[in-house]
Image: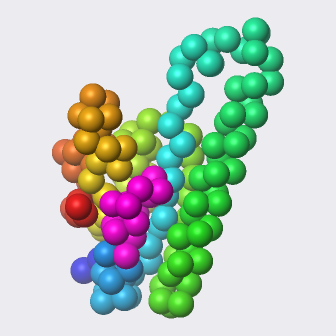
């Protein structure tokens, strides 16, 4: 049924729950899981201020990518004893767009995502990533609360 499961992670409690739910599914269906982290784009005023800030945007980007990689490494380590075929992927962009692009390009059978990892108020203002993914995904989406 499920052979490829995409698991977007943001470090929140709900995304961690989504990971462990996906692990259970992967064990049951002998599926491969891809742990994905999307580093949100830098705000426009940082991108356009490169002349004034010099190397600062690049160092911010490098730090965000390093933190994302460390987070994914910790998640992989936390499930290493489960004998699941796992890979990881990190990218910078708009989270929902990047998740949908990855799911479309690589034909995932299921996306398991935590609900509103940013928190209720911020998620309401910015729009829920999980809501957008569930509306536009090419495959079933399991939202974990």
Q: Does the magenta segment cover residue 120?
A: no
Image height of 10 relative to 94, above or below: below
Figure disc tally:
0
Q: Is residue 4 visible?
A: no
Image height of 126 relative to 30, above or below: above
Image height of 84 relative to 144, above or below: below
Using residue 87 as the reference point, say whether residue 128 is left or right of it. left
Residue lying farthest right?
Answer: 55
Please give the name of the residue rendered at 32% of the width and 44% of the height, measured from the top-left corner: 119
Using residue 99 as the reference point, say whether residue 93 is left or right of it. right
**Quadrant position of the C terminus in the picture:** bottom left
Please give the name of the residue rendered at 27% of the width and 35% of the height, measured from the top-left corner: 121
Of the pair 127 and 27, the residue shown nearer to us: 127
Image height of 8 relative to 91, above or below: below
Q: Could you say which quadrant of the image residue 22 lies in?
A: bottom left
Of the pair 56 and 8, the residue shown nearer to us: 56
Residue 51, percent across and down?
A: 76, 9
**Quadrant position of the N terminus in the picture:** bottom left
Please give the name of the residue rendered at 56% of the width and 74% of the height, measured from the top-left corner: 76
> In this figure, which colouring scheme has been used for the structure?
rainbow
Q: Is residue 106 visible?
A: yes
Using residue 134 as the reference point, say whether residue 28 is left or right of it. right
Residue 52, percent across and down?
A: 76, 9
Please give the name of the residue rendered at 72% of the width and 41% of the height, measured from the top-left corner: 62
Q: Could you say which quadrant of the image residue 54 lies in?
A: top right
Question: What range is drawn magenta here?
Answer: 5-20
Q: Does the magenta segment cover residue 15?
A: yes
Residue 111, percent across and down?
A: 31, 62
């Amino acid at each position: 049924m499920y052979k490829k499961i995409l698991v977007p992670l943001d470090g929140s409690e709900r995304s961690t729950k989504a990971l462990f739910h996906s692990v259970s599914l992967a064990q049951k269906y002998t599926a491969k899981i891809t742990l994905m982290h999307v580093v949100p784009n830098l705000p426009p005023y940082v991108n356009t201020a490169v002349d004034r800030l010099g190397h600062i945007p690049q160092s911010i980007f490098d730090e965000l990518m390093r933190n994302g990689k460390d987070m994914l490494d910790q998640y992989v380590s936390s499930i290493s004893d489960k004998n699941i075929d796992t890979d990881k992927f990190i990218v910078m962009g708009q989270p929902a767009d990047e998740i949908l692009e990855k799911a479309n390009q690589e034909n995932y059978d299921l996306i398991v995502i935590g609900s509103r990892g940013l928190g209720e108020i911020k998620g309401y203002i910015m729009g829920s990533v999980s809501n957008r993914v569930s509306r536009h995904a090419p495959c079933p989406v399991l939202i974990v609360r």
